[in-house]
Amino acid sequence: MVPIMRLLVLGASGQTGQHLVSQALEQNHHVTALVRTPSKIIQTHENLEVVQCDVFDRAALQPHVNECDIVLSTLGFPIQFREPVPHFVTVEGNISECMKEAGKRRVIIMHSWYTDPASREKTNGFVLRMFVKYFIGQVLEGMFHSEQEYAKTDHLDYTFVLPGGLTNGPVTGKGFATNDTDYYVSQLAGSGDTRIERADVARYMLTILDDEGSYGKCRAICPVNE
C-alpha cells in the first residue's frame, strides 16, 4: 500500500491534472496544485492547497518543491510546426534543478506515445503516421529532448508515463499493458485500442508513486480489457 505523501502537481487545472488531484485526495495524500489560474480549480479539500505559480520561473517553483515528497506533472503545451516545442525542456529542466537543490528524487511526468522519433515509423496506418510525424511531431520532439536530458541525470528517480490517445470518460478500473523500450504498446499486448481515459492515466501515475521498478523509465501504457 502506498503511504500517504505530500504531492506537488503541475498542470493541475488541465483535464488529466484535475483527475490526478481528485484521485490523490481520495487516497488521502496531501496535494499542492500549482496553476496559472487558481479559479480553474473548483474542488476544495482540507488536504488541498491551490497555488498560483509561474513554473517557468525556477525561483518561484523552488519553495514548493522543497516542501513535497514527489513531483507529478501533466503539463502540456501548444502545438508548433517549425521547431521542437521548447517548453518541456524548460519547465521539466526547472523541476530537475529544483529537485536537485531540495535533495528530492521522485518525479513522474506525463508525456505521450511516440516521443522517440524511431517509434513514429512503426505507427499503424498512413493517417496516424502523418499525424504523429507532422501535426504533433514537434510536440513529441520537445518531449523527447526532455527525456534525453533526464536520462543524463543521476539525482532523479524519474518516470515518464506515455499514454496513447487521451479520452475524457470516467475511470475504468482496467488493468494496464506497459512497454519500457518501444515508446508505444503493441495492440496485441493491450485492448486493441490505443486510446486511454485521462482518469486512468492519473490512476496509473498514482499506482507507481513508490514503484522502484519504474525508476528511469519512459513507460508507454494502454488499457487492457478484462
Image: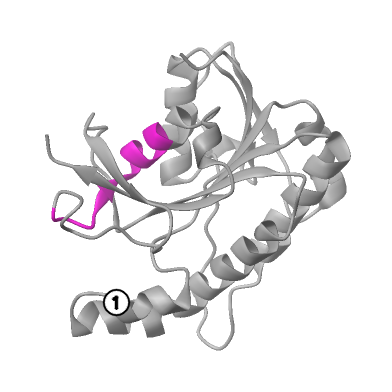
* Quarter containing the C terminus: top left
Q: Which residue matches tag 1?
A: 122
- For residue 118, which quarter of the picture? bottom left
198 falls in the magenta region = yes
Residue that extends furthest to the bottom in the rendered view of this protein: 82
Picture coordinates of residue 52, whole percent (x, y): 70, 39
Image vertical order of residue 48 relative to residue 110, above or below: above
- For residue 73, which quarter of the picture? top right
Image vertical order of residue 20 relative to residue 89, above or below: above
Q: Give the range drawn in magenta.
A: 192-204
Picture coordinates of residue 71, whole percent (x, y): 64, 37
Closest to the observer, 50 or 117: 117
Image vertical order of residue 87 relative to residue 97, above or below: below
Amino acid type at mark 1:
Lys
Picture coordinates of residue 213, whole percent (x, y): 50, 37
Closest to the observer, 76 or 182: 182
Q: Residue at x 59, y 73 (%)?
A: 85
**Secondary structure beneath disc 1?**
helix
Image label count: 1
Q: Residue at x 15, y 49 (%)?
A: 191
Is residue 89 something that shows in the picture?
yes
186 falls in the magenta region = no
Closest to the observer, 166 or 149: 149
Image vertical order of residue 80 relative to residue 114, above or below: below
Q: Which residue is drawn at 62% across and 70% down?
A: 145
Dot 1: within a 10 Å radius of its alpha carbon, few (fewer than 14), some, or many (20 or more) residues? few
Picture coordinates of residue 132, whole percent (x, y): 36, 76
